[in-house]
Image: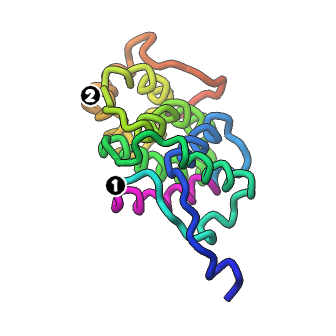
């Protein structure tokens, strides 16, 4: 047993961590896979407690740099409404984190960057306690859609639901010129074209 094992839990803002993970995906930054894995470990606790401020064992954060842990602890002080008021958004974040981990393992750089961009505003909505309006996710869906074929059916369903559409509608819109938005100069996998 190490001194870290019996250290008191650290209160962190889980949505600040999710935001950092999505930002890391946007830039395909080194270390982002570690952030994704930590968020994946913490999100069930957020869902169970229905709050974005969670106390976690320091060992859960062991792979993070000390300044990142400090930032997460400081972020707790800026949360306006820690209660989760948008459970659909939280479920989508959880699905997306697992999807991003899968894509990272597969080396799907373009899909990771597009999905990270599409989802980066979601943690702030949860963190601020704001209700989610699907009409504001349309552009983000179009960014994610550039790599639609790379995403699992679960991820496609969750993304479409956030925009208030059916995945079949997204598939139909993919053929329309101008529907998808290419944010990054990385072509989709060959089978997507």
At which x and y percent is residue 184? 63, 24
Q: Nearer the viewer, mark 2 or mark 1?
A: 1
Instruction: Note whether residue 83 is visible.
Output: yes
**Neighbourhood count class around disc 2 (C-alpha, 10 Å): few under 14, some 14–19, many 20 upward:** some
Q: Residue at x 36, y 41 (%)?
A: 89
Position of 32 with respect to 99 (left or right) is right
Q: Is residue 115 magenta?
A: no
Instruction: Note whether residue 189 is visible.
Output: no
Q: Can you say which quadrant of the picture contains the N terminus?
A: bottom right
Distance between mark 2 and mark 1 Cα atoms: 24 Å
Q: Residue at x 56, y 70 (%)?
A: 9
Count all numbered tags in the image, as a single digit.
2
At which x and y percent is residue 81? 40, 42
Q: Nearer the viewer, residue 70 or 163?
A: 70
Position of 71 with respect to 139 (left or right) is right
Magenta stretch, residue numbers: 34-50
Q: Residue at x 44, y 39 (%)?
A: 80
Which residue carries the number 1 mark?
Answer: 50
**The furthest residue to the top:** 177
| Marks 2 and 1, the one that precedes in the sequence | 1
Q: Nearer the viewer, residue 191 or 90?
A: 90
Q: Main secondary structure of the magenta part?
A: helix
Q: Residue at x 35, y 57 (%)?
A: 47
Q: Is residue 45 magenta?
A: yes
Secondary structure beneath label 1: loop
**Neighbourhood count class around disc 1 (C-alpha, 10 Å): few under 14, some 14–19, many 20 upward:** some
At which x and y percent is residue 161? 29, 35
Which residue carries the number 2 mark?
Answer: 164
Position of 150 with respect to 174 (left or right) is right
At which x and y percent is residue 133? 31, 26
């Amino acid at each position: 047993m190490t001194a870290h094992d019996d250290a008191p839990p650290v209160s962190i803002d889980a949505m600040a961590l999710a935001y950092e993970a999505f930002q890391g995906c946007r830039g395909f930054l080194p270390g982002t896979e570690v952030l994704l894995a930590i968020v994946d470990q913490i999100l069930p606790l957020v869902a169970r407690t229905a709050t974005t401020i969670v106390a976690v064992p320091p060992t859960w954060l062991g792979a993070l740099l000390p300044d990142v842990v400090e930032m997460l602890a400081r972020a707790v002080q800026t949360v306006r409404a820690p209660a989760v008021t948008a459970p659909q958004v939280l479920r989508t974040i959880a699905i997306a984190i697992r999807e991003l981990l899968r894509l990272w393992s597969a080396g799907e750089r373009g899909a990771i960057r597009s999905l990270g961009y599409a989802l980066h505003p979601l943690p702030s909505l949860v963190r601020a306690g704001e209700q989610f309006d699907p009409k504001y996710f349309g552009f983000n869906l179009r960014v994610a859609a550039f790599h639609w074929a790379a995403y699992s059916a679960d991820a496609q369903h969750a993304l479409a639901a956030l925009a208030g559409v059916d995945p079949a509608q997204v598939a139909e819109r993919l053929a329309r010129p101008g529907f998808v938005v290419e944010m990054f100069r990385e072509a989709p996998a060959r089978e997507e074209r």
